[in-house]
């Protein structure tokens, strides 16, 4: 994993697809969606049917939720089995081995998943109805895209994907996630291993992402050839996706990559951690991610049968298993690296003691050895500390990490 500071940027043109006159232009729109899905797997929708007033209202509702005291938000904590509820600084990413520094609230359509997970009307009047209305608008737009993508793949039934995302059934897994990234002081250095959202691909079928103008940070890196490939560290060059009013960023998720036998690409993306006051956004950042996730019982099988047939539930379980195995490998790698660093420091200390330079004996506090050793000590100490913090929160959230 490269650090945020030495990242390479590439100016890619992210496809922009207008949904104007959808019914009349459906073939043209389908061709554009397929081309975008086959290349970067990420595109921007314009002239779509979700009104700006509805987007603004949902951002305002999310803002009201995040402004509540943690003790109130914690009345509806995140649970993995439901993939719903509130969590803070607890989603660990395999790419970083650390938790993302944000809070999020995940909402689902089904009463079964949301039992005890909706914030109470007394705490936030109207929040539930507002959010469900927004989710229906996102779902309705998603069904148009699903129909085009099924046609583009040449499936016999262009409703295959729509039918696999039936929000009236209790086993629907689709999620609206409201996110809040905390403001950082631009004058203070960013702590080691502080990540807004580490590189990842979504497990969903298709994600609709709403950003606020001026609250930048979203970046993408294409190039995963197979859904089984994590891709972290390969082709590590990123492109910024600037937020703009009225636009929706869509990214193909792993499920659609799997379902299309890897023809449609699920893109790596992340939210940049601000480290450079000249270019980065340090303020509070809010976003809304609508993850289309299928019914647990639907059957997933690509037209070319590249991968075995699985149910929606099995796909999610396999993705979680793979994710946590990779997370563990990354955390173990970091632990080994820290132990090696610690051993190197011990060796350096011993050799400094064997041959103490004259100036070291005379003026300890100005010695270059003292200086470098102190610097090493404090770097190692702070790395060890932050790793311990990461490990603690990662294991606390272990299997609670949300599914995207
Ligand atoms: O907040 C964002 O812009 C991206 C969020 C995201 O990628 C996720 O939650 O999976
Ligand atoms: Fe994501």
Image (tube, rainbow, N blue to C red):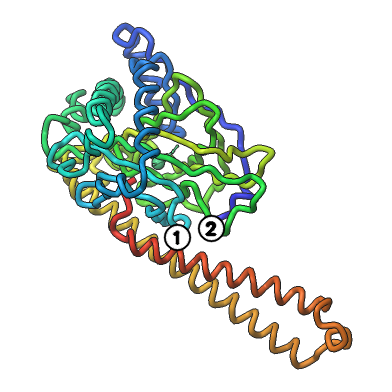
Q: Nearer the viewer, residue 51 or 253?
A: 51
Q: Position of residue 128 (x, y in %)?
A: 23, 31
Q: Is residue 41 left or right of residue 84?
A: right
Q: Position of residue 312 (x, y in %)?
A: 19, 43
Image quarter for ligand 2: top left
Can residue 143 be seen in the rendering of this structure? Answer: no
Q: Nearer the viewer, residue 210 or 6?
A: 210
- Name the residue rendered at 49%, 37% in the picture: 285
Residue that mark 2 sits on = 193
Q: Position of residue 300 (x, y in %)?
A: 20, 40
Q: Nearer the viewer, mark 1 or mark 2?
A: 2
- Name the residue rendered at 47%, 49% in the picture: 198
- Name the residue rendered at 57%, 44% in the picture: 237
Checking the image for residue 97, the label placed there is 1
Local secondary structure at mark 2: loop
Local secondary structure at mark 1: loop
Q: Is residue 352 left or right of residue 11?
A: right
In the orientation shown, which residue stands out farthest toward the bottom? 354
Q: Is residue 26 left or right of residue 340?
A: left
Displayed quadrant of residue 293: top left
Q: Position of residue 50 (x, y in %)?
A: 34, 18
Q: Nearer the viewer, residue 337 or 129?
A: 129
Disc 1, disc 2: CB below 8 Å? yes
């Amino acid at each position: 994993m490269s650090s945020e500071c030495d990242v390479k940027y590439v100016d890619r043109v992210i496809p922009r697809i207008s949904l104007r006159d959808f019914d009349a232009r459906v073939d043209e729109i389908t061709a554009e969606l397929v081309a975008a899905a086959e290349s970067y797997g990420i595109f921007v929708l314009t002239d779509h049917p979700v009104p700006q007033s509805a987007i603004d209202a949902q951002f305002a509702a999310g803002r009201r939720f995040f402004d509540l005291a943690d003790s109130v938000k914690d009345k509806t904590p995140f649970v993995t089995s439901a993939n719903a509820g509130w969590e803070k600084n607890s989603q660990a990413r395999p790419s970083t081995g650390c938790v993302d520094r944000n809070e999020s609230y995940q909402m689902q359509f089904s009463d079964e998943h949301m039992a005890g997970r909706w914030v109470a009307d007394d705490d936030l009047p109207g929040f539930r109805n507002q959010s469900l209305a927004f989710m229906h608008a996102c779902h309705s737009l998603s069904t148009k895209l699903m129909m085009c993508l099924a046609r583009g793949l040449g499936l016999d039934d262009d409703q295959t994907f729509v039918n696999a995302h039936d929000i009236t059934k209790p086993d629907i897994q689709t999620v609206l996630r409201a996110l809040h990234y905390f403001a950082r002081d631009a004058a203070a250095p960013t702590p080691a291993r502080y990540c807004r959202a580490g590189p990842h691909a979504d497990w969903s079928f298709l994600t609709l992402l709403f950003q606020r103008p001026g609250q930048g940070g979203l970046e993408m890196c294409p190039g995963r050839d197979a859904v089984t490939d994590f891709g972290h560290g390969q082709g590590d060059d990123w492109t910024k996706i600037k937020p703009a009013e009225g636009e929706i960023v869509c990214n193909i998720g792993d499920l659609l990559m799997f379902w299309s036998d890897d023809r449609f690409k699920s893109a790596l993306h992340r939210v940049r951690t601000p480290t450079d006051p000249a270019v980065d956004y340090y303020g509070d950042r809010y976003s809304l991610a609508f993850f289309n996730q299928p019914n647990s019982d639907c059957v997933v099988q690509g037209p070319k049968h590249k991968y075995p047939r699985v149910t929606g539930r099995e796909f999610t379980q396999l993705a979680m298993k793979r994710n946590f195995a990779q997370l563990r490998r990354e955390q173990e790698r970091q632990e080994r690296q820290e132990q090696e660093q610690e051993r190197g420091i011990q060796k350096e200390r011993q050799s400094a003691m064997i041959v103490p330079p004259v100036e070291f004996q005379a003026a300890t506090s100005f010695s270059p050895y003292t200086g470098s050793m102190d610097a090493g000590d404090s770097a190692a100490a702070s790395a060890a500390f932050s790793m311990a913090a990461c490990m603690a929160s990662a294991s606390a959230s272990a299997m609670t990490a949300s599914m995207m």
